[in-house]
Image: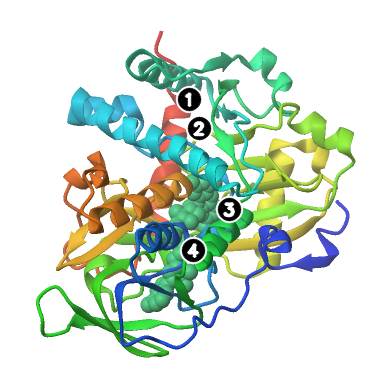
Amino acid sequence: MKDLLTTDFRNAPWWWEAAPLTESAGGTLAPSYDAVIVGSGYTGLRAALTLARAGRSVAVFDKERPGFGASRRNAGFLGRTLKWPYIDLKATKGTTHATAIYRDLSMAYESTLAFIEEEGIACHAVRCGRLIAATSAAHYAVLERELDGMKADLGLPYWMVPRARLREEMATDLYDGGAVIPDLGSLHPGLYHHGLMTRALDAGVAIFGRCEVTTIGQAGQPGRFRITAAAGETRARDVVIATNGYTPPHFAWHARRVIPFVGYMAATEPLPPALLEKQLPHRRTVIDSNLDIDFFRPAPDSPRLLFGGATANGLQDPVAIATLLHGRLRRALPDLADVRLSHVWTGQCAGTFDMMPHIGCHDGIWYGMGYNYAGVPMGSLFGLKIAQKILGLPEGTTAFEQAPFPTLPLYRGNPWFLPLAMRYFAWKDKRLARSRPAA
Ligand SMILES: Cc1cc2nc3c(=O)[nH]c(=O)nc-3n(C[C@H](O)[C@H](O)[C@H](O)COP(=O)(O)OP(=O)(O)OC[C@H]3O[C@@H](n4cnc5c(N)ncnc54)[C@H](O)[C@@H]3O)c2cc1C
């Protein structure tokens, strides 16, 4: 193998090339706002924009520069699935609940694309389709059963790709075939966030970057809050916590309910167009069928491959991360064995104990978080729904608010058990792979 990294290698998201983080001072802090939002990702900004356009005064605070969180770091896969496959949710919670959840997932997906189109946000949003690559024959059979159940109950399209035809989708022999979901999408997460942020600023939202919120307390009058941030103190009638995988320990109730974990990604150097086209001829997003996923996609704005995996492995050193990810790349796409990496980055995601995203109001404070790797559509939807709830609009309801937000005794937000959980997921993946596919 040649050198692993390009000479201009950056330990930063590829997305920041087109959508670099910027400072945002927010102006003079007002003594009070109608709404204060903590966190400037998709959740916080979508809520802020909706409220501002309804005439509310809104301030958004971020501990770092706006967009520093996962919203400018993710893979840009736009889907409508959860870690809970539809047929498992149906078997456990019943058809009514499962269809209501999956209908709202479809709403998150469709409404995000519709919003991008209506707003004219240039972020390469496309319905490119997704290949789910089966890591064994048994995975292939489970995948087919899941997708068949979703097609029967929800009318969602798919087709199976047997191993013998997999090279029509991806230049690999690693997988035991897969399935294509033709209408799923992708976007450039940095440009999507940038578009959301410029629209929020245009609507009059004050965005305070590098301005950590340290306390949120009752302000004496019922329904009013006192917020202490690095820029000073202010008050608000409504407060939204939109910190997902970056939720700090001092938001103790929320920190006890989300499980922060690190996601890893890399970008290759520019590839000869024919080589890139051979890897993913239909330019679909690709995810494998494991619980501990590997994922691949073409960059929308450069002839590069973007990919990720090895979630929550604990590595921090960029060269060590690059080495690990490159191994995954070579295993899946051997044609790219000598390709160098130009960018490697990480970002914080948030899991939950029931593997479901959560939206709601605790002690008068609104929250939306725990997206389990589906925050592009779900963060966008929950931001909108929270704003609609604050505005008293009936369309703010969602099937996701019905479940309590669980925690575990003694859990305080430090996921010491993550390495064990990832080992358990890997064991489950292998156990399924070794099993005989059901007839
Ligand atoms: C590598 C990676 C790949 C992913 N791929 C996908 C994908 O392909 N598709 C998908 O749907 N999802 C994906 N996700 C998940 C998705 O990116 C997130 O779920 C989503 O961006 C969360 O948005 P958010 O607005 O809730 O939070 P974030 O965008 O994470 O923003 C939270 C913000 O809160 C701020 N904050 C924290 N504490 C404070 C405080 N006390 N005061 C002020 N500010 C504070 C942080 O600085 C941060 O900027 C991925 C995530 C990662 C990391």
Task: Please name the residue shown 28% across and 34% down the image.
Answer: 101
Q: Amino acid at mark 2?
A: Ser
What is the three-letter code of the residue carrying label 3?
Answer: Tyr
Q: Secondary structure at mark 2?
A: loop
Q: Which of marks 1 and 4 precedes in the sequence?
A: 1
Q: Are marks 1 and 2 in contact (CB under 8 Å)?
A: yes
Q: Quadrant of the C terminus?
A: top left
Q: Quadrant of residue 226?
A: bottom left
Q: Is residue 8 above or below residue 79?
A: below
Q: Which residue is mark 3?
A: 192
Residue placed under numbered mark 4 in the picture:
200
Q: Residue at x 48, y 25 (%)?
A: 139
Q: Using residue 106 as the reference point, say whether residue 10 is left or right of it.
A: right
First in sequence: mark 2 or mark 3? 3
Q: Earlier in the sequence, mark 1 or mark 3?
A: 1
Q: How is the image coloured?
A: rainbow
Does dot 1 land on a helix, a strand or a loop? helix
Kindly indicate the quadrant of the structure image that contains residue 186.
top right
Q: What kind of residue is marked 1? A: His
- Marks 4/2 in contact by CB < 8 Å: the verdict is no
Residue assigned mark 1: 139
- Badge 2 is on which residue? 289
